[in-house]
């Protein structure tokens, strides 16, 4: 039996992969750099949202099994990843 958190994370990643493949096919279909840049900009928005969503689901899934100290370190690490993406 799959854990609900793992299933949710996997479904989000599958949707993310489908979005990436669809974007690549659209870029090939339009065959124009300006339209490819618009599609790529959309992916730049979707990627961090998927990251935040999957990490949130994962943290909720392990919250009761991990000590508060370790949970703070995990959240700090995620914060640093997001900060690095922003810069």
Image (cartoon, helix red, strand yellow):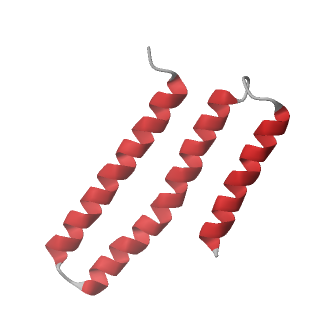
Comparing 45 with 68, the one in front is 68
Comparing 66 with 11, the one in front is 66
Using the image, determine if residue 26 lies above or below residue 20.
below
Using the image, determine if residue 61 lies above or below residue 35.
above
Q: Quadrant of residue 84?
A: bottom right
Q: Is residue 53 left or right of residue 12?
A: right
* Quadrant occupied by the N terminus: top left
Using the image, determine if residue 64 lies above or below residue 8.
above
Q: Position of residue 71 (x, y in %)?
A: 77, 38
Q: Is residue 53 left or right of residue 80?
A: left
Q: Position of residue 61 (x, y in %)?
A: 62, 28
Residue furthest out toward the top: 1
Q: Position of residue 36 (x, y in %)?
A: 29, 78
For the point 41% across and 44% down, the residue is 13
Q: Position of residue 21 (x, y in %)?
A: 26, 57
Using the image, determine if residue 59 lies above or below residue 22.
above
Comparing 41 with 3, the one in front is 3
* Quadrant occupied by the C terminus: bottom right
For the point 54% across and 43% down, the residue is 54
Q: Is residue 28 left or right of residue 4?
A: left
Looking at the image, how many numbered discs can be counted on the residues? Answer: 0
For the point 33% across and 55% down, the residue is 19
For the point 76% across and 52% down, the residue is 76
């Amino acid at each position: 039996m799959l854990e609900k958190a793992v299933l949710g994370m996997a479904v989000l990643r599958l949707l993310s992969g489908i979005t990436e493949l669809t974007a690549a096919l659209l870029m090939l279909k339009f065959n124009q750099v300006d339209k490819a840049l618009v599609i790529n900009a959309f992916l730049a928005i979707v990627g961090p949202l998927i990251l935040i969503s999957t990490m949130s689901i994962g943290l909720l899934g392990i919250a009761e099994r991990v000590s508060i100290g370790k949970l703070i370190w995990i959240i700090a690490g995620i914060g640093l990843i997001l900060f690095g993406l922003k810069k």
